[in-house]
Image (tube, grey):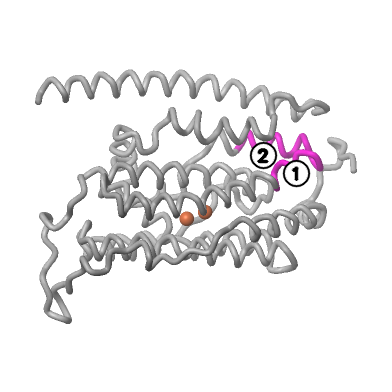
Amino acid sequence: MTITPQEPITQTQLLLEMEQVVEDNLNRHLSVAKEWFPHEYVPWSEGRTFAGVLDGEPWRPEDSQVSDVARSALVVNLLTEDNLPSYHHEIATLFGRDAAWGEWVHRWTAEEGRHAIAIRDYLLVTRAVDPDALERARMQHMSTGYQSAHDQELLRSIAYVSFQELATRVSHRNTGRLTQDPVADQLLARVATDENLHMVFYRNLLQAALQIAPDQTMRAITDVVTTFEMPGANIEGFQRKAVEIAIAGVYDLRQHRDDVLMPVLRYWKVFDLEGLGPAGEEARTELAAFLDTLETQASRFEQRRDRLRERLAARV
Ligand SMILES: [Fe+2]
Ligand SMILES: [Fe+2]
């Protein structure tokens, strides 16, 4: 099927055109995703009843065995996972409930549901965070909800989740390491494995879209990359936490560019694609310029962080 610039493909056409790819990738996903049990990853015997209804022991800051920045990263990751009902709403409205699209929506939601369960159980059992503050933050964050910046636009939404799933993979993986707790590390590595498979699913869909509608898809990729925000960006105090998290090396501009954007863009071969029309070429040029700017910003950030670390080390 050839799409001329005068005839942009509609979302309904795209949903239909991509149905087979979705089905193939759903089957692929089901064949490689391994069953796992969140309860096996939680050290239940460490748990103690909290103060309140059952009159247990109040939480005290000394209970927490993880660093302040590890705690911030754990809470950001958990609150991000907590907003699953909003994400479900976004993709269910966009992908629909029919055939393979609908089956993916439900399967993906079920897998994502494990993430908040597992992380919350771990945090409460190990008393890593203030449980009252955590619950208030969850209420506040979920009451705000999440709305995609891509306004129900299929190509941009698939491009966004391709990067976002990989971004959460990196963030979970590095948060696990930062805790210096082998139990948290193992749990978050397991969650990160799920995120990686989700990324693969969406990445393959977008690759098919590049074949079906190259110019429109190229534009979608550029729009998403140049405006990317983490899904938890509306968490209260996110900016401050994001800086802490970047300084700790959990998720920073260098990782965002080199470990999230570039591997996916390389997989799509965006800089080697042939046959783009003027609109697609324009989008690709914009993308290349953006990536260059991001390279400069990432290097500057690293230099500033190195200086900060040297100053802190000199103080000790
Ligand atoms: Fe997740
Ligand atoms: Fe995911």
Residue 272 lies, with reference to residue 45, above or below; the image says above
Q: Residue 217: which numbered mark, if any?
A: none
The amino acid type found where label 2 is placed reads: Ala
Residue closest to the far right: 1
Q: Check disc 2 and report its element: helix, strand or loop.
A: helix
- Residue shown at 80%/26% (left/top)? 274
Examine the structure image and report whether residue 215 is included in the region drawn in magenta: yes
Q: Quadrant of residue 299?
A: top left
Horizontal side of 259 relative to 9 (left or right) equals left
Q: Amino acid at mark 1?
A: Ala
- Residue 155 in percent (x, y) is at 68, 46
Q: Is residue 298 or residue 263 the one in the foreground? A: 263
Residue 23 lies left or right of residue 151; in this view the side is right
Instruction: Give the residue at x 45% y 64%.
Output: 114
Mark 1 highlights which residue?
209
From the viewer's perspective, is the residue at label 1 or at label 2 nearer? 1
Q: Residue 47 placed where, x, y %?
A: 21, 68
Label 1 Cα crowd, 10 Å radius (few <14 / some 14-19 / many 20+): many
Quarter placement of the N terminus: top right
Q: If you read the primary sequence from the N terminus, does the residue marked by circle 1 or circle 2 appear first?
A: 1
- Whether residue 162 is in magenta: the answer is no
Above or below 257: residue 28: below
User: Spatial distance from mark 1 to mark 2, Cα to Cα?
Assistant: 10 Å
Q: Tag count in the figure?
A: 2
Q: In this figure, which residue is indicated by the disc labeled 2?
A: 220
Tags 1 and 2 touching, CB below 8 Å: yes
Task: Indicate the position of residue 265 as horizontal and vertical percent values.
Answer: 63, 32
Query: The magenta stretch spans which residues?
Result: 205-223
